[in-house]
Image: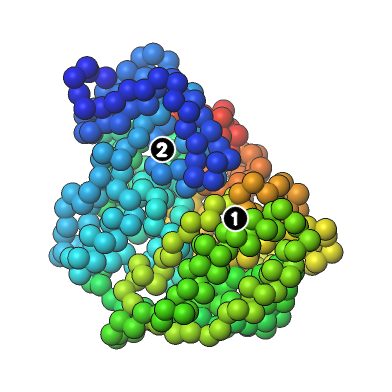
């Protein structure tokens, strides 16, 4: 990298992810202030035989972004670059945080169609690992991409879309950092709209028996099951005419503090210290829920703050296998000595056409399991993963799993298409690391 630029270099800085379960000590960290500086950083690293990885806000639970070479922090490459209202698109720099994007879009009367439940990630980090919400008809954030640019291993900028380098576009929307460093993304957007959320406690047996009905009748359906209980909380989000009617103070406190943040932190700390208290805590927490309905603009309904740190595994299953797998998970927890203080989250997605999307080519349902940071999670996750893989599950690329390229090639029909493209774009594995070696092969 040319001296005198605003890019910064730091030697032997230790990086760790949000959950604290992944660390890396790169040879240097660079924060390019322009695409040109990023290109130069990639060229220089390749000349020196160093690997290059870009890292967003560290919300992945895997080592997808870890490197002992050059770590790129893209946060200076941020902001909306252009808005095309006629085409219904917005182009943003890759280091833009989803929260900032949502606020900026809302100020212009625009919105993404669907999103995940947090918005702390950069747009490139979220899309590259397959971040998703829940939806009957609307899919992951990556599926809303209409074009992108990335710096390839030889330092070129490659623009791709359905019309321009379509084979790269098919894969790079969710590239796990293996094909290059994304610098800009063009998303489909639409005029700002209202969502009405209806939250309702429901028994496990009822929600699983009625699962297909709830998915069919609602634009966005999800639910949480509280282990050690037969209790769930369901959430149905559907478009409405408005006006905004946000949650009242008490119900907001229950959701934001009791179930997500301050009080939830305290009860999880107690559960970690005294595991025997976990089932009783779960019963109290699940019974604290009551039905509520509120209306707001999309990001205020889809997303919520998450201050309690945890480790997570999530698998995407064929949607028709969801209920059977979830019942098996409940039976496993019920007969085991495990003490699980976090709810299990269930969401859905329609099939999409992204090469390595967890919903690629099939209607999908997701099961996510969590453990509080600092609590041993391996026994729970291993038992859960055994169930998920027996149903043809695909692990979320940014969440804990133990699968390798041999397994993944069996559950992704287009796996070879992706690895062949990687061989063409990055034959020397400038963007490689240990995680990619495991999940994609040599």
Above or below — where is 409 with respect to 188? above
Quadrant of the image containing the N terminus: top left
Residue 332 visible (yes or no): yes
Q: Residue at x 31, y 74 (%)?
A: 297
Above or below — where is 281 with respect to 431? below
Residue 179 in picture, x, y percent from top left: 41, 36
Quadrant in which residue 315 is drawn: bottom right
Residue 52 in picture, x, y percent from top left: 41, 27
Q: Residue at x 56, y 48 (%)?
A: 399
Q: Residue at x 60, y 34 (%)?
A: 438
Q: Residues within 10 Å of mark 2 (few under 14, many from 20)?
A: many
* Colouring scheme applied when the structure was drawn: rainbow
**For this rendering, which residue is in front, 236 or 340?**
340
Residue 237 in picture, x, y percent from top left: 44, 78
397 with respect to 389 (left or right): left
Among the two numbered marks 1 and 2 on one chain, the one whose residue lies closer to the N terminus: 2
Q: How many marks?
A: 2
Residue 43 in picture, x, y percent from top left: 31, 21
Above or below — where is 63 with respect to 343? above
Quadrant of the image containing the C terminus: top right
Q: Residues within 10 Å of mark 1 (few under 14, many from 20)?
A: many
Q: Determine whether the residue tagged by mark 2 lies in a helix, strand or loop.
A: loop
**For this rendering, which residue is in front, 58 or 151?**
58
Q: Residue at label 1?
A: 314
Q: Which mark is residue 55?
A: 2
Image marks 1 and 2: residues in contact by CB distance under 8 Å: no
Q: Residue at x 53, y 85 (%)?
A: 291
Quadrant in which residue 29 is drawn: top left
**For this rendering, which residue is in front, 9 or 179?**
9
186 with respect to 377 (left or right): left
**Seen from this angle, which residue lies furthest top?**
48
């Amino acid at each position: 990298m040319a001296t005198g630029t605003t890019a910064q270099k730091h030697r032997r800085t230790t990086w760790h992810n949000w959950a604290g379960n992944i660390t890396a000590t790169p040879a240097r960290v660079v924060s390019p202030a322009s695409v040109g500086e990023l290109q130069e950083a990639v060229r220089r690293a390749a000349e020196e035989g160093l690997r290059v990885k870009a890292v967003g806000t560290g919300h992945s639970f895997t080592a997808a972004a870890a490197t002992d070479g050059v770590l790129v922090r893209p946060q200076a490459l941020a902001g909306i670059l252009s808005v095309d209202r006629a085409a219904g698109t917005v182009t943003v720099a890759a280091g833009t945080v989803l929260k900032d994007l949502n606020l900026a879009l809302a100020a212009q009367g625009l919105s993404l169609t669907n999103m995940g439940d947090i918005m702390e990630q950069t747009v490139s980090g979220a899309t590259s690992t397959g971040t998703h919400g829940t939806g009957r008809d609307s899919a992951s954030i990556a599926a809303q991409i209409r074009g992108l640019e990335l710096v390839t291993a030889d330092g070129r900028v490659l623009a791709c879309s359905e019309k321009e380098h379509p084979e790269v576009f098919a894969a790079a929307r969710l590239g796990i950092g293996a094909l290059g460093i994304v610098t800009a993304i063009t998303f489909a957007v639409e005029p700002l709209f209202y969502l009405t959320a209806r939250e309702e406690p429901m028994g496990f047996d009822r929600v699983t028996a009625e699962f297909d009905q709830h998915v069919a009748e609602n634009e966005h359906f999800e639910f949480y099951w509280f282990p050690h209980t037969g209790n769930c909380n369901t959430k149905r989000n559907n478009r409405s005419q408005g006006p905004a009617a946000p949650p009242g103070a008490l119900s907001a406190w229950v959701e934001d503090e009791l179930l997500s943040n301050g009080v939830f932190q305290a009860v999880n700390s107690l559960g970690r210290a005294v595991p025997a208290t976990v089932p009783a805590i779960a019963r109290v927490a699940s019974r604290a829920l009551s039905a509520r309905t509120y209306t707001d603009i999309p990001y205020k309904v889809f997303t919520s703050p998450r201050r309690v740190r945890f480790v997570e595994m999530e698998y995407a299953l064929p949607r028709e296998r969801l209920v059977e797998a979830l019942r098996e998970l409940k039976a496993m927890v019920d007969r085991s000595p495990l003490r699980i203080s976090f709810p299990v989250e269930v969401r859905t997605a329609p099939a999409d056409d992204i090469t390595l999307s967890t919903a690629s080519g099939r209607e999908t349902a997701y099961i996510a399991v969590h453990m509080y940071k600092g609590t041993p999670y391996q026994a729970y996750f291993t038992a859960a993963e055994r169930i998920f893989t027996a149903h043809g599950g695909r692990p979320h690329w940014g969440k804990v799993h133990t699968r390798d390229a041999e397994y993944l090639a069996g559950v992704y029909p287009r796996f070879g298409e992706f690895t062949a493209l990687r061989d063409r774009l990055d034959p020397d594995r400038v963007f490689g690391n240990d995680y990619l070696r495991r999940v994609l092969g040599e």
